[in-house]
Image (cartoon, rainbow, N blue to C red):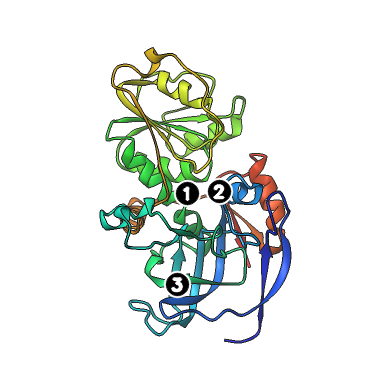
Amino acid sequence: MTGHYLAMQCDGPGQPLRVVHRAMPVPGPKEMLIEVAACGVCRTDLHVIDGDIPAHYPIVPGHEIVGHIRQLGSKVEGFELGERIGVPWLGHTCGECDYCRSGRENLCDVPEFTGCTRDGGYAEFVVADSRYCFSLPYRFSDAEAAPLLCAGLIGWRAFRLAGEGDRVGLYGFGAAAHILAQIAVWQGRYVYAFTKPGDVAGQAFARKLGCVWAGGSDVPPPQPLDGAILFAPVGSLVPSALKAVRKGGRVVCAGIHMSDIPAFHYADLWGERSICSVANLTREDGLEFLTAADKSGISPSVETMPLAQANDALTRLRNGLVQGAAVLMP
């Protein structure tokens, strides 16, 4: 394909996105040119734009991409022209380091990340490595499928690490938590939702999705939790979550960036409680989650906005004004 396409570009840390027109890229042998149909707006995009995590500037953010294949590289296998696919955060791995060779490609020493070190989906077109793309369940619309590709995937990995206990707490009830809560309820678990103190609307939304309890993050749950997942990037919530989990419980920090964790008493950790973080995802995570998402009957709640309003969408996300997930539609 020839011509130009529109993209929303970040020129450097702290800079607002600006409209640029770029020459149509040519995919490499194992890459595909994808026409973007929808791209979710993720908190990680804010960290890229704010300079909280290393990125290659100028960069086009966006790593929850749904689109259709318009051009195939000469060595692409398993995909066809016109097929609808999803492009996630993990854009490429080396396949050679100890982590890749031991089935932990999410910890690859020299990875590439969509919308961070390679251009992402805040654009009309994007080039992606075909080996890291996913076929998507047909029952989800383009907008509904977008948040599955990070909020859902990272939530799923965090969920598995939190253990198999019946009672799970979700701190920060945004895009990831609202998807994960539905999965957990489908599995027969009891979900406790923690929002910003005073966020009555968010708590009502959580209860509507099947959570057995919803309250502010400054309030302890009515029952000890078997595990807790922190989606809010607030380090001070770690000690609070430790106090909320029972002996042997695990607190999983699901964000790629978090404010510093304050000091806390060893007694809050004792009793074989533990803290761990989630880093990125593997392709196996993606296949498992998308299968579960399809079977579970979950329904992502999305707010759609035009691509040109990407800065407004990011501001709404930053200010906690998005219920569910925001999705840009080129």
Q: If the image is split into quadrants, where does the C terminus sit? A: bottom right
Work out whether 204 lies above or below 326: above
Amino acid at circle 2: Thr
- Would you name the residue on which mark 3 appears? 84
x and y, in percent, of residue 14 in the image: 71, 49
Q: Residue at x 32, y 26 (%)?
A: 249
Amino acid at circle 1: Ala
Between circles 2 and 3, the one closer to the viewer is: 2
Badge 1 or badge 2: first in the primary sequence: 2
Between circles 3 and 1, the one closer to the viewer is: 1
- Would you name the residue on which mark 2 appears? 44
Asked if the residue under mark 1 is in contact with the one under mark 3, i.e. CB atoms within 8 Å, the reply is: no
Amino acid at circle 3: Arg
Res. 135 image quadrant: bottom left
Res. 5 image quadrant: bottom right
Badge 2 or badge 3: first in the primary sequence: 2
Q: If the image is split into quadrants, where does the N terminus sit? A: bottom right
Q: Residue at x 54, y 81 (%)?
A: 26
- Would you name the residue on which mark 1 appears? 151
Between residues 55 and 296, which one lies in front from this camera angle? 55
- Gap in angstroms between the C-alphas marked 3 and 1: 19 Å
Between residues 217 and 9, which one lies in front from this camera angle? 9
